[in-house]
Amino acid sequence: MDIAKVPSQIWIVGISSMLITLSAAMFFGVFGLFLAAIGVSTASIGAIEGVVEGISYVLKVVSGIVSDYIKKRKLILSIGSFCTALSKVIAALFVSSNAVVIGRIIDRIGNGLQATPRDAIVSDYAPSKIVGTCFGIRQCLGTSGSVLGALLLSVLLGTFQNNFRLVFTIAGAFALSAFVLVALCVHDVKKVEPLSDAAEYEPPMAPRFLFKNVLELDRVYWTLMIAVAIFMSCRISETLIILYAKKTFSLEDSKATRVMLVYNIFAALAAYWTGRLGDKRESTRLMIIGTLITTASITFMGLATIYEVFLGGVMLWGVQIGVMQNVFCSEISHIVSKNSRGTGFGIFYLITATSILIANVVCGRLMNNGGARAFAYCAVASFISFIAILLLSRSKVWVNRRISMSNPENN
């Protein structure tokens, strides 16, 4: 790996990303536990999770478009980083149900705002010959933050029982550090030009969402979107999984949050493996494998009667997150022309946001009467998506489209 050639700006963005995800993992892990401790129902928590995750996905589209339009990625990134810090400050100061919910919403707004311009900055600075290395470093640092945050949260809850204010305060300190780092050290590219070893560098295209391009999206794309909608409707929030584990196996908060630690570790490992296979054009097979892993994961968690078996399902859940979170985007890039990709990705994110909202509202209500029905619903949705993707991948139209779009002249 050409790590020595990676620009310093990418390391700075990566470190700030690690601090933000560390903070977010702590806040996310204790969010559901705090609300449950003060008497908020599982159905209400599921609805809240669905709404805030939907907001995050929609803002990822908006922030990318805005940052391309005003050409000030750092400004949007800084606002997003500030929101992530503000969310924990609000929760730490007031420690009430309203404050924590408002903090969670602001946190997801911050996540949605900063995610796309952050990756755009990496793309702007990355020399063309080591783009994969640059994004790999950014992703690795970000995922490491999630793992460290889950581990630190488990230690804090084990040492200081139910001291939620302390957790919110420490999470806020990490998020504030990330904001300061971004504000002082991150800079927009002043002039798009080749770097020393990047003679073939080209500036990234603006991901414009154009309604006229909707007409260019054919049935192959829309069939994939149907599969996406079905699959994402089984994406139950990890908050609900943590609450289910705590209730079913009578766990202390510190042990319940280890669910998130296991999930993050296996998601990170799977993401690295998926990235390598994705470069070899194996994304179609990965979609099929990912849906099967999801079905197996949900089945393990739903039927588990001992905690160790449940953790096995959590491991598989982490694997499927690592496999599926980028594979749909990879497929869209294969089957949609370059001029319509902004529209294609925009629709994808909107469908994802809607489906995740439905999944968490439905599963939150079902879990009020135990988790069996919620996991059964998710397993059925996942298996149906597996059938849809399997049939799509074997159709001649799908195969011919992927072969056509792999031709450089069509990209």
Image (cartoon, grey):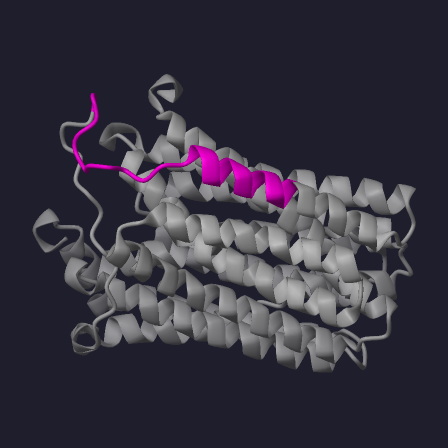
* Percent of width and height locating residue 264: 63, 46
Q: Nearer the viewer, residue 129 or 304?
A: 129
Q: Which residues are magenta?
A: 174-197
Using the image as rendered, state which of residue 299 and residue 367 is in the foreground.
Answer: 367
Residue 353 x/y as whole percent: 48, 71
Asked which quadrant contains residue 261, the reply is top right
Q: Which residue is painted at 55% across and 76% down in the image?
A: 357
- Residue 160 placement: quadrant: top right
Labels in figure, total = 0
In the rendered image, the quadrant that contains the N terminus is top left
Q: Is residue 329 above or below residue 1?
A: below
- On the rendered structure, is 247 left or right of 69? right
Image position, residue 238 (x, y; %): 67, 61
Depth check: give the residue in front, 313 or 63.
63
Question: Is residue 393 placed above or below 14 in the rendered structure?
Answer: below
Seen in the image, is 318 located left or right of residue 168? left
Q: Give the residue at the far top of this rendering.
A: 4
The x, y position of residue 223, in whole percent, is 32, 75
Q: Is residue 189 magenta?
A: yes
Quadrant of the rendered image containing residue 144 = top right
